[in-house]
């Protein structure tokens, strides 16, 4: 059976672990040649090796989204090796536990914390798009998949800098889709709900996880593979008429009246 992404080259940022790892592996299993770009180069190398061990094609390259030169170097290396870029998955974000812990009440919010969220999550996404889009224009097609979050569209009491930076990613997604649609380059964003990873588990206690599960319409919280399946869809021709969309992959947590979780619990 022909694989959906045979002959296509994909860059996945922040793919040295967790959601990015799952996305990179899913793209590779559909035949894409995958570049694992991460500041965590050891993680990226491990994932690249695991993809090759499974019969896929991948290589790891260091990336620091804070530095435009690092983005330039990455893109040049990808073009030298593969000669094309078909898929860009902007997955990386500043999710360091110290950053997320400091991204709290606005009265105490340090400007450095705000700036770091925007520098990695939003400016980093813009820089990757800026340097990859010429190759997509030349190829006459491309798919850019930005990683946003459910908190980009709904108010929460945590992480104002992170939330705002992801709302800006939504705006950038639609702007990119508008700018490059006539070149056959699509740009969409995925808005995950809570995805169970070591980081999200460490940030939330059992009680908080149970609360989120109660308000999720489906009977479970998310897994990295749930996001990876959406990324493969958006990367492939299956979504060839889909662009400028903010696609929630969240078990329905952002779709209902705030009281639905309580009502369902009462109904048993
Ligand atoms: N886990 C969740 O519940 C959840 C929910 C909503 C959205 N998301 C989004 O999904 C994406 C992946 O999240 P995750 O949970 O797998 O977290 P993660 O921390 O495992 O992934 C972030 C990756 O980005 C990389 N990174 C950080 N700073 C970088 C920089 N300056 N340059 C290059 N790479 C850098 C990290 O090394 C890491 O590999 C993020 O965009 C996150 O905001 C996650």
Image: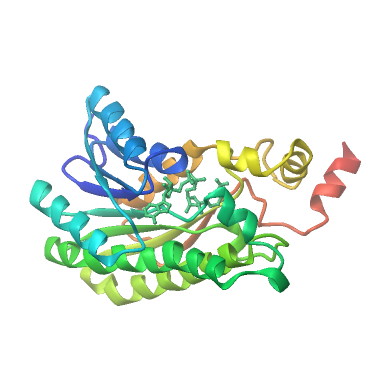
What residue lies at 24% left-to-right and 73% top-to-bottom?
182
58 in relation to 151, above or below: above
For the C terminus, give its image quadrant: top right
Is 153 above or below relative to 248? below
From the image, which quarter does the N terminus lie in? top left
Estimate the x, y position of residue 143 in percent, counting from the top left: 29, 58
In the rendered image, is residue 243 in sight? no
Residue at 69% across, 36% down: 219
Whole-percent x, y for residue 192 in the image: 55, 51
Q: Nearer the viewer, residue 232 or 210?
A: 210
Q: Is residue 209 left or right of residue 15?
A: right
Q: Position of residue 92 (x, y in %)?
A: 41, 53
Left-right relation of 229 to 88: right
For this orientation, the residue located farthest to the right is: 266
233 w.r.t. 134: above or below:
above
Residue 228 placement: quadrant: top left
Residue 27 can be seen, yes or no: yes
The residue nearer to you, when weighing 206 against 1, is: 206
């Amino acid at each position: 059976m022909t694989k959906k992404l045979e002959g296509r080259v994909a860059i996945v940022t922040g793919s040295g672990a967790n959601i990015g790892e799952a996305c990179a592996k899913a793209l590779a299993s559909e035949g894409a040649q995958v570049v694992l770009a991460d500041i965590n180069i050891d993680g990226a190398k491990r994932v690249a090796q695991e993809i090759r061990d499974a019969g896929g094609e991948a290589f790891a390259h260091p990336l620091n989204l804070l530095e435009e030169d690092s983005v330039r170097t990455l893109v040049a290396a990808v073009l030298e090796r593969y000669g094309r870029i078909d898929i860009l998955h902007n997955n990386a974000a500043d999710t360091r536990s110290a950053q997320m812990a400091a991204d709290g009440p606005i009265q105490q919010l340090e400007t450095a914390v705000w700036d770091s969220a925007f520098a990695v999550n939003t400016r980093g996404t813009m820089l990757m798009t800026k340097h990859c889009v010429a190759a997509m224009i030349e190829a006459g097609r491309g798919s850019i998949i930005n990683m946003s979050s459910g908190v980009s569209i709904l108010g929460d009491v945590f992480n104002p800098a992170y939330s705002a930076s992801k709302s800006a990613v939504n705006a950038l997604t639609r702007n990119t889709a508008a700018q490059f649609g006539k070149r056959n380059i699509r740009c969409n964003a995925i808005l995950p709900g809570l995805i169970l990873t070591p980081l999200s588990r460490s940030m939330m206690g059992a009680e908080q996880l149970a609360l989120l599960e109660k308000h999720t319409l489906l009977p479970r919280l998310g897994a990295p593979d749930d996001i990876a399946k959406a990324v493969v869809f958006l990367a492939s021709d299956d979504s060839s008429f889909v662009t400028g969309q903010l696609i929630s992959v969240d078990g329905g947590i952002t779709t209902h009246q705030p009281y639905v979780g309580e009502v369902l619990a009462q109904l048993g």
